[in-house]
Image (cartoon, grey):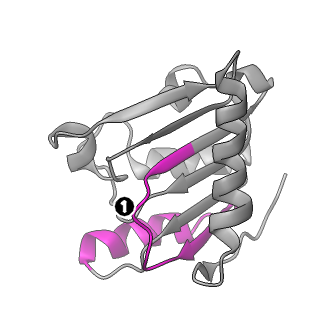
Amino acid sequence: MRLFLRDPQLRSLTLVSPFINTLKDCRFSLADLSTKIREQRIPTYLVTRRPVEPWQIEAFNILSANDYIEIRCNESIHAKVFVASANPESESFALFGSGNLTGAAINSNLEVGMMLFAGGLGRKLVHDLYYWTTNTLRVLPESKLYKPMQNRK
């Protein structure tokens, strides 16, 4: 939601969640996020599990249609980490916790999460989470490329 309310200029976005859905019942849907990514040309990296259920496939279809999104599938993924790298860096943030990128996690499940901002002591933690998601987890041999990014800024 911070992406929509504060609207920082993003350099990249990384989403790590075993399960994703369309977020149709949320204030901002996955389609809204995809539109924002496309309009602002935000390189976005998603690491998730392969879609099996119809609601997962629907979410994949939304994201796969976006040339600024790379999708990788890792069947061992359990982490839920979302990192927004912004310009200026002080607008960067990370969210990690127990919630998947699903409407239930946002609207009804009992989840816990922590948001870190890239200021003061949080700067290094946000940087470390960004590095782990984009330069470690994303390129593991188990993180199979499902859909490459077609466009970059």
Left or right, 64 with reference to 8: left
Q: Residue at x 27, y 69 (%)?
A: 55
Q: Residue furthest right?
A: 153
The residue singled out by tag 1 in the image is 20
In the depicted view, which residue is nearer to us: 66 or 132? 132
Type of amino acid at the residue the image marks with label 1: Ile
| Image quadrant where residue 9 sits | top right
In the rendered image of this protein, does residue 79 appear above or below residue 29? below
Q: Position of residue 46 (x, y in %)?
A: 56, 62
In the rendered image, which quarter contains the N terminus? top left
Q: Position of residue 56 (x, y in %)?
A: 33, 71
In the rendered image of this protein, does residue 152 appear above or below residue 52? above
Neighbours of disc 1 within 10 Å: few (<14), some (14-19), many (20+): many
In the depicted view, which residue is nearer to us: 24 or 110? 110
Q: Residue at x 48, y 29 (%)?
A: 115
Q: Position of residue 135 (x, y in %)?
A: 74, 61
Indicate the secondary structure of the residue bearing disc 1. loop
Whether residue 139 appears in this view of the structure is: yes
The question of residue 41 being in magenta is answered with no
Whether residue 67 appears in this view of the structure is: no
Q: Residue furthest top?
A: 120
Count the labels in the image.
Answer: 1
Q: Residue at x 42, y 51 (%)?
A: 30
Left or right, 111 with reference to 117: left
Q: Which residues are magenta?
A: 53-82
In the depicted view, which residue is nearer to us: 49 or 141? 141
The question of residue 74 being in magenta is answered with yes
Q: Residue at x 61, y 52 (%)?
A: 14
Q: Position of residue 96 (x, y in %)?
A: 46, 42
